[in-house]
Amino acid sequence: MCPEVIHKDADAARAANLRDYEQACRSFSWQRARAELAGMPGGGLNIAFEAVDRHVEQGRGEKVALRCVGRDDSVLNITYGQLAAQSAQFANVLKALGVGRSDRVFTLLGRCPQLYAVALGTLKNGSVLCPLFAAFGPEPVRQRMQLGDAKVLVTNEALYMRRVEANRGRLPGLEHVVLVGPVAGEHPGTMRYDEAMAAADDRFATVPTDPQDMALLHFTSGTTGTPKGAVHVHEAVVAHYATAGFALDLHPDDVYWCTADPGWVTGTSYGIIAPLARGATMVVDEGEFDARRWYRILAEQRVSVWYTAPTAIRMLMRATPQAGPDELPGRFDLSALRFIASVGEPLNPRAVLWGRDVLGLPVHDNWWQTETGAIMIANFAACEIRPGSMGRVLPGVEAAVLARGEDGRVLLDAQGRVTVLDAGAEGELALRPGWPSMFRGYLHDDARYAACFADGWYLTGDLVSRDRDGWFWFVGRGDDVIKSAGHLIGPFEVESALMEHPAVAEAGVIGRPDPVAGEVVKALVSLKIGFAAGPDLEAELLAFARRRLGPAVAPREIAFDQNLPKTRSGKIMRRVLRARERGLPEGDVSTMEDLRS
Amino acid sequence: MTRDEALDLVRDAIRRIVPDADFTALGLDDPYRDALELDSLDFLTLVETVTKRTGVRIDEDDYPKLTTLSAFADFLTQNAAR
């Protein structure tokens, strides 16, 4: 299965947080991990307290928490003490607005310094943080704010005008909009971040939230229906802390860079909470991907631990191929870099080896998802890497591969029991609930939450196999969800947007394999009578979808097909569309409507 | 290739990604990626399209020279001539 195992030397093992994998798996407990954090009076636990205040109380207030690299390459250092003060100010802003415990505060921002004060201030106030990705269009933004009961939105003027203002009337629950940065125009119903912060005290008694209080709301996509708001609680910080030690080998003296945007779960769990909880210095890059810029940041900021995504690594590979002149990284001093990890979609073995040969370090792939809140399976610093594998379970995590029935779902016997498969067999990856960052529900959607469990297992929806030594290997998704550039995209959301166009009768949306992004979103549409397929309509539909959904979700290709494959009940068979796209056999189509009859 | 031809070509390549891109509101010296919300995959597609149509090789090192429409057009005219 793996072309070449990458072995580690003994020195690497000695310096790692996780020195002896088997021993750690035997001795680890989440209770003991919890004891490494401070906690709050009365048994309280608050993510922001562990991430910021704790370090200040323990005399580390002068240490740099954030090193914010601007688009113009300017660098702004923010110490733990300053971050504590700024987040306290924002908590006071919320309090003054009457925003309280469990109220939802949404962010729609780029990776600007203010985002971190807002995120942590929200948690200090006992409110719930729901970060949105700035490349979401107006529709995904509105829908998520509606589903998540947004009471406050923190954004900037440009994003407010592009994404929110036109829909404000449809969001009656949205009481406050706070605009970060310069504001040129008049926007009724908004307030300025700078003014509110200037008037706010920089001391705030962090709310001693219960470990089971809701802290974070992350939207994710399923095959059908609206996006799902995965609920995470303050106790999740125990898993963020522990897993960043094990899977990212993060130490307090590290300069750490997570390239994920906080609008996605990776950018919150490992781009805000985990590195701060471990007391590291974190690089925040406001700019977009650019190979030369990224190498420059790695070099100039002396990044030692780097957590990025397969798509980004594949883009770097294009810029600096293994066989070509590897000048780009050679021109930058990457000597501080000691550990690289990646998450988002399976990392191909070639990318792991490219890291070793071109950057001088192999890439450690790991696996988790929005619902798990933290890394569950990983290749570790002190352990061999099997390129192409997701790695092994983290200490404290129990995983199994479950048999699936003909309908593609996990097979249950008459007593409702699952069948755990042996090594080598393909099935659905399942996890035994009990780790602290496990999601506690989908907001307002108990039925879909319940459907994620069977016989005491959480069903991940990912198909995998496990080898005899415990390494997991990704096979594919068990459903129709699309993974593009590490982001999960629900086909239903895209189809619904396309169906709003007067020309579209039906739409089926799939992932088209892409060498860089893993998959890109492709839509197949059938047209209503009176509309003609052609380049003009194709362009119109692309533009229409992009305006509504934004670049992160919108299809990048549209094709016309008047005979979309459907079940007899009229449901579009995305599975068949996917098979056609890949030139594979269409599989069992016995339930398919015969279009020629 | 004249500069105007190069400009048209770049605009046309962008329109393949953002078909309703409003170039009247965008100055030739404005950074178009932000204004038109091209993400990194979009930008990669743009570079590939332009390369395919012009035969001009565009390396990663050249990307900083492609931040505005006029800079992109200048780059193409200079390099196509070689």
Image (tube, coloured by chain):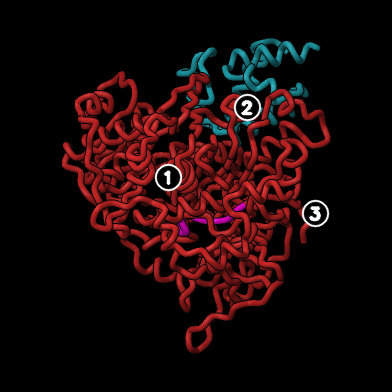
Q: Could you give the CA–CA distance between mark 2 and mark 3, rounded to whole angstroms?
A: 29 Å
Residue A227 seen anywhere in this rendered image of the structure: no
Question: Could you tell me which chain the residue with mark 3 belongs to?
Answer: A
Q: Colour of chain A?
A: red
Crowd class of label 1 (few under 14; some 14 to 19; many from 20; radius 10 Å): many
Label 2 element class: helix
Residue at image mark 3: A4
Horizontal side of residue A374 vs A57, given as left or right:
right
**Residue A226 position in % (x across, y down):** 40, 56
Q: Colour of chain B?
A: cyan
Label 1 element class: helix
Horizontal side of residue A243 vs A148, given as left or right:
right
Q: Quadrant of residue A279?
A: top left
**Residue A185 position in % (x across, y down):** 29, 20
Q: Nearer the viewer, mark 1 or mark 3?
A: 1
Going by the numbered disc 2, the residue's amino acid type is Ala
Please report whichever mark, 2 or 3, sits nearer to the chain's N-terminal start: 3
User: Where A449 sits versus A496, above or below?
Assistant: below
Residue at image mark 1: A277
Mark 2 and mark 3 on one chain: yes
Q: Are marks 2 and 3 in contact (CB under 8 Å)?
A: no
Q: Could you give the CA–CA distance between mark 1 and mark 2, rounded to whole angstroms?
A: 24 Å
For the point 43% across and 61% down, the residue is: A32
